[in-house]
Amino acid sequence: MAYSAEISRANPTCFVFLLDQSGSMSDPFGGGGTRKKADSLADATNRLLQNLVIKCAKEEGIRDYFHIAIIGYGASVGSAYSGALAGRDIVPVSEIGNSPARIEERMRERDDGAGGLVKEQIKFPVWVDPVANGGTPMGQALMRAKDLADGWVRAHPSGFPPIILNITDGEATDGDPSGPADALRNVQSTDGAALLLNLHLSSTAGVPITFPDSEAELPDQFAKALFRMSSALTPAMRTAAASEGFRTSEATRGFAFNADMVSLVKFLDIGTRPSNLR
Amino acid sequence: VEVRAEAYSVPKVGVTDAENEDSYAGSAFDEWLSCGSCAFAVADGATEASYSRLWSNLLTQRFVQAVQSDSADIDLVQVAASAADEWRRHIEARPLPWYAAEKAASGSFAAFAGLQLLDQQADGETVTRWRALAVGDCCLFVVRQGCLIERFPIQRSDDIGSSPYLLPTRQEFLDPARVFTSEGTCHSDDSILLMSDALAAWFLRTAERGEQPWVPLLDFGTQAAVEFTETVADLRCRGELRNDDTTLVRVDVFK
């Protein structure tokens, strides 16, 4: 059965995040807010990295179930890590956890258990800073991801295949990205094909859409093109999505419009996950 | 009534013995024990939490101690609350990096199955009653005269998955309605088996096919630990046993 390889330190899997760092990412989100897309993207990526590090954290340290590359594309295509990891491609999650560029103090609101919210200070590790500059060479970025995925699969031929999450505001400036996307989705381990997920951050106002099963409800041509480039959700991803309240079918794809995808990392099975762990 | 218990535990392939997050405890192992009030327990710490080995170990040890110091029916919620205080004191004493502090703040989780054996007087005779308590997917089975007469708390192999409800260190995550109990009377030659989830899933699946999975588990001889390790390796190799920490406590009853 595909996508059933055990994820362990001996058989780790690989994530590649592709971050759109083009000039248009300095525009605000659709819907009248002022927050720049580039700021939201950096925050979302840092939160996702934090989630992955914590998922692998044990009392003795961080177990290397995952290895992660962060590739930015804008004025150039290359590693988007800041700080000690700058310039690196695929980095073991233990090194990521131990080498944030900095740890900021931020405030967050938390449910007080009595129907109210309390503010608390939290540590917010930062690996990626906002960048918005240049064009949108998405095709090149997808080819870079394909090279990384190819190399990973050669070294881990029977492991859980690489997962690529592309986060963009949609419009490639280096031609039709669907060819490179097809090539990337054709990278195979014996456990299955590489999984390409797309998150569309749009300046167009519109309700967030997560895990659609057809392009009919999507608001523009860029969203529709990204939907077509996205892999179908695996059965385990569908179960995870369903447990978060999303309706899924066999046609559901790993695509979201103006939404977050933290829930998608929860499906990765590295052992028993308590159902009462919130 | 006398009992004799044996315990075996093998970590999943790819982790060391020190990383085995299953724990077991008992009033005594590998020796005859007259019952009075004795106890045995198995717990399985969650991989996706930290300090899970510490938590499963505290739960099993404190459960057995509670039974030995009090012959009344044990309240697992109370035992867990006191073990959780101890767990927190262990963690708070250590300086932690940001990720470990964040993870520890979510607490730890474990599946648990405990067995309490109590001698009671009924109609001038001493009867030994067994009482089982469980949260999550650690299981207890009673085998009598070649028949499986008790499956607890999970009845079917399909009900064992990768996201069970588990006993948490943080009491606000605990729903007392998820603590299950069962009880019965011990007969001579009964065997009571406590096991963690991977072995329980195999046990139930095999029983569902009409076979007798208890036979190899009851028959370990003098080289029992070696035989258990070989049995587990063989089942994993054949794809019948999930690669997970695997623990068995077998309590044999004699009159």
Image (cartoon, coloured by chain):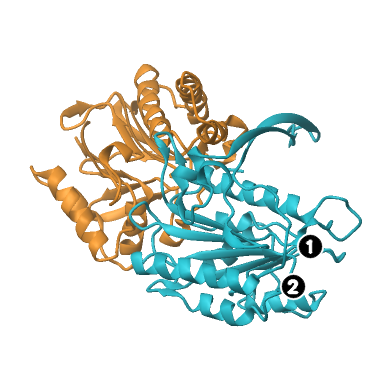
Q: Residue at x 70, y 50 (%)?
A: A130
Q: Residues under labels 2 and 1: Cα distance?
A: 10 Å
For this rendering, which residue is in front, A80 or B112? A80
x, y percentage for residue B206? Answer: 30, 63
Colour of the chain lettered B: orange
Q: Secondary structure at mark 1?
A: helix
Q: Secondary structure at mark 2?
A: loop
Left or right: where A106 falls relative to A27: left
Q: Residue furthest left?
A: B222
In the rendered structure, which amino acid carries the disc numbered 2?
Glu
Colour of the chain lettered A: cyan
Q: Is residue A233 visible?
A: no
Vertical order, B23 against B143 (above or below): above
Left or right: where A80 falls relative to A58: right
Q: Chain of mark 1?
A: A
Tell me which corner region of the image, top left, top right, bottom left or bottom right, holds residue B173.
top right
Could you tell which of marks 2 and 1 lies nearer the N-terminus?
1
Q: Are marks 2 and 1 in contact (CB under 8 Å)?
A: yes
x, y percentage for residue A205? Answer: 87, 64
Q: Chain of mark 2?
A: A
| Number of the label disc, if any, that sits on residue A135 | none
Vertical order, B172 against B154 (above or below): above
Left or right: where B161 falls relative to A266: left
- The residue indicated by pointer 2 is A171
- The residue indicated by pointer 1 is A24
**Quarter of the image that includes the C terminus of chain A:** top right
Q: Residue at x 74, y 50 (%)?
A: A39
